[in-house]
Image (spheres, grey):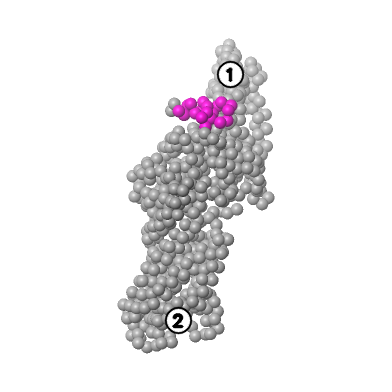
Amino acid sequence: MRTQLTAAADMTAPVAVPAGSPGPSAVAVTGLRKSYGALQAVRGVSFTVERGEIFALLGPNGAGKTTTLEILEGFRSRDAGVVEVLGLDPGDRSHGRALRARIGLVLQDIAVEPYLTVRETIARNAGYYPAPRDVGEVIGLAGLAGLERQKVRNLSGGQKRRLDLALGLVGNPELLFLDEPTTGFDPNARQDAWQLVRSLRDEGTTILLTTHYMEEAQELADRVAVISGGQIVAAGTPATIGGRDTARTRIRFAQPAGYRAGDLPAVAVAGDGLVTLETAEPTQTLHQLTGWALARGTVLDQLTVDRPSLEDIYLRLTDYDGHEHTTERNAR
Amino acid sequence: MTLVSHQAPRRDLAMLWHQIRYEQLSFWRNPQSAFFTFVFPVVIITIFGALFRGASGSSYFYGLSALQYYVPTIAAISVLGACYSQLAIVLSTRRQNGILKRVRATPLPAGTYFLGLLAHCIMVSAVDVALIVGIGAAFGTPLPTHWPAIALALVLGAASFCALGVAVASLIRNSEAAPAVVQLVLFPLVFISGSYMPIHSDMLNRVSGALPVRPFNLALMGPFAQHTGFDWKNLGVLLAWGAAGTLIAIRRFRWDPRPE
């Protein structure tokens, strides 16, 4: 727990490279572009993933996450931009094998051969790598202990997904790509997977993951980038992204009977029975409001005080069809 | 560095063996593939054996008994099944399921993957041919004598039909269409090549002689029953088809179910 806290604290520092990071970034992307016919899937994406960190790429379906990831993994070509993965260009086939020996992949769909057992499947892939992890160790790490002799076709969806994860780990990669790794996991399995990802990071593995789950990004990521419409619209730590740390506090309560929003001691907006106001000085504003209510013998029912969650920020950032402005006006 | 370069070829060879072992394991564990690869040709040769049991002395085809004719043609059909059909279907299914994409994500070289499949298919073909020769012998067919010529025809035929299987898998997008496409190509080809009945039409024989199945039949029939050795002309036709299949496979093969 201590190491995680230290790592997180490092990340909030303005310096991009964490202290003691050896060599250049694990992933460096500059001005990446990719079109499919008339559709511009990726429109000038730039970001870096430092060695030893967990970096999450967030974004709605069709935002360009998977295309970006597949270019980094060497599955797709790019139209423009500079891409380096562990110092190598994944678009250059001549060192494809050397690069694939150093990266691990967990792709979105489950794909494992049905007739081999769990152990056989992992042992087969271990044989492809120059310095693989021990097969028994990987079985334990992926939470497949006790299922070694099961045929893959008899596994549940979540178990197959864990086998996929095991295959991503077995080559002992320096960099692990996880494309929506916990989709279909039950809450316990998800907690275990998160713990595994953290422990891999603590061992020095760099992890680049995509996810739909804000909770997952919040729990795991040292840094996040939000991609929308083929562009990075925000990047930072989960705590600071999109100005989350400096965002105004939102106070909401039921409109006191017999009073209008204009009667309150602070500027507030009323709607659907609730009064909402935003403030940069929550202590003072709350004191004014509660003092006002006590002085008039009324109450602030359903009082809540919150800051925008990562999900609020995400929804605001990825809502690029014009909604954004109306929401913001309403809030003010 | 020298240590690495010394070890690299040996490691690649070990990886090839590793790959062959797991291909074998996947194959034998899958009841469907094992059933169709072995049971179909065995049933056919057994039926022919029962049909022509009493006619072992008489001439069915230019001095050959019926079973002397059918043991090599059905052996050829079993190789087609083990190599061409099997590979076309397995590869398009693996691609559709995303398994090929996973293979591509590992450092396993593409060449090793395909060599592993080829070696696996040759092994399965050898088992198939041995079974058919054995059943033929049980029905009184004399055992062949020119084993080196048989071995060469078998390996070359298996390799060529593997290449054609990969080529077909490269040209089909949808794995559900694979069995139909495979049979659509194979069934008329096998028929006009005389695999199920001798063909006495010169025109048809000239056409099928330029296609891959009849040359394979003849290259096997010579050393199997006619006491002739290497049939270079037909082996050459087979090789040309194998080269064509390899070319298509190299140009068109895709690992990704949703390519760009």
Magenta stretch in the rendered image: A3-21
Name which residue type carries label 2.
Met
Which quadrant is the C terminus of chain A positioned in? top right
Give the residue drawn at x 46%, y 70%: B156
Circle 2 crowding by C-alpha within 10 Å: few under 14, some 14–19, many from 20: some
Say which chain tag 2 marks: B
Q: Horizontal placement of B242 versus A331: left or right?
A: left
Q: Chain of mark 1?
A: A
User: Could you tell whether A78 is left or right of B152 in the image?
Assistant: right
Q: Which residue is mark 2?
A: B197
B22 is higher (above) or lower (below) than A314 = below
The structure residue drawn at horizontal position 53% and vertical position 30%, both measured from the top left corner, is: A18
Q: Which mark is residue B41?
A: none
On whether disc 2 and disc 1 are found on a single subunit, the reply is no
* Furthest residue in direction front, as rendered: B2
Front residue of this view, candidates A160 and B232: B232
Task: Name the residue type under label 1.
Answer: Pro
Helix, strand or loop for disc 2: loop
Camera-side residue of A150 and A47: A47
Residue A282: numbered disc: 1
Q: Magenta stretch containing residue A15, yes or no? A: yes
Which residue shows up at 49% across the image and 76% down it?
B232
Q: Is residue A267 above or below residue B128?
A: above
- Asked if residue A294 lies left or right of residue B132, the reply is right
Q: Is residue A229 visible?
A: no
